[in-house]
């Protein structure tokens, strides 16, 4: 764990322990690295691509900090929407020969992993909401194990 995270740790920042938030920040970093060098005439498109990738991790964090299960799930759906916007852009840039094959693969693989993790997290939270097992407190209520497809407990996360 990085030094700054150990020193600045509190219950409201628990989202930083979620794999989906970590994956979303990694996707943002890669998007910046691979899209920022677009030529001047594509700067507006590059800016929009970076903004949509930025929105994903921000919405995961905001939903987590809201504490209401309804708002948390709503923000995760917004994150999924932003991720869809990002993926659509990656495909269009690739098809227009603005994004190299290997750069497209890096972004698409990361986005696919994140998308599946977010979908599993939403399913887990919706089950908690439906069964009344959600506790509105500032703790990490989900286990990262729910994101593993081959996990036998993925259908009944903690």
Image (cartoon, helix red, strand yellow):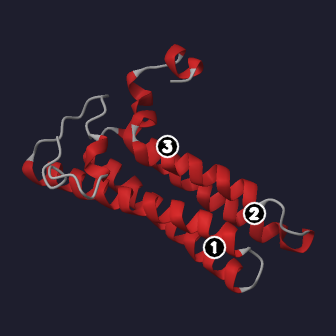
Q: Residue at x 57, y 76 (%)?
A: 88
Picture coordinates of residue 55 (x, y %)?
57, 54
In which quadrant of the rendered image does the C terminus lie?
top left
Q: Disc 2 to disc 3, how far (Cα)?
A: 20 Å
Task: Please say if 59 is above or below 90.
Answer: above
For marks 2 and 3 on the same chain, the one whose residue lies earlier in the sequence: 3
Which residue is at a point 56% across and 46% down the rendered structure image? Answer: 25
Q: Name the spot of residue 11 as percent of width and height, x first.
A: 38, 24
Give the number of the disc on residue 35: 2
Task: In the displayed orientation, state which residue is furthest to the top.
Answer: 7
Tag 2: Cα neighbours inside 10 Å, few (<14), some, or many (≥20)? many
Q: CA distance from mark 3 to mark 1?
A: 20 Å
In screen coordinates, is 126 left or right of 111? left
Dot placed on the residue nearer the N-terminal end, 1 or 2: 2
113 horizontally vs 30: left or right: left
Kindly state the secondary structure of the residue where label 2 is placed. Answer: helix
Between residues 44 and 36, which one lies in front from this camera angle? 36
- Sequence order check: which comes first, mark 3 or mark 1? 3
Please name the residue that numbered disc 1 is placed on: 90
Q: Which residue is mark 3?
A: 22
């Amino acid at each position: 764990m990085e030094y700054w995270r150990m020193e600045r740790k509190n219950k409201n920042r628990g989202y930083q322990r979620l794999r989906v938030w970590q994956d979303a920040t990694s996707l943002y970093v890669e998007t910046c690295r691979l899209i920022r060098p677009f030529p001047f005439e594509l700067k507006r498109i590059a800016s929009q691509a970076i903004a949509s990738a930025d929105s994903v991790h921000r919405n995961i964090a905001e939903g987590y900090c809201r504490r209401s299960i309804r708002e948390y799930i709503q923000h995760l759906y917004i994150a999924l929407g932003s991720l869809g916007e990002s993926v659509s852009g990656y495909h269009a840039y690739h098809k227009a020969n603005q994004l190299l094959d290997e750069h497209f693969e890096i972004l698409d693989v990361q986005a696919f992993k994140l998308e599946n993790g977010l979908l599993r997290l939403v399913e887990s939270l919706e089950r908690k909401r439906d069964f009344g097992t959600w506790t509105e407190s500032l703790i990490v209520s989900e286990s990262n194990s729910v994101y593993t497809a081959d996990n036998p407990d993925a259908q009944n996360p903690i």
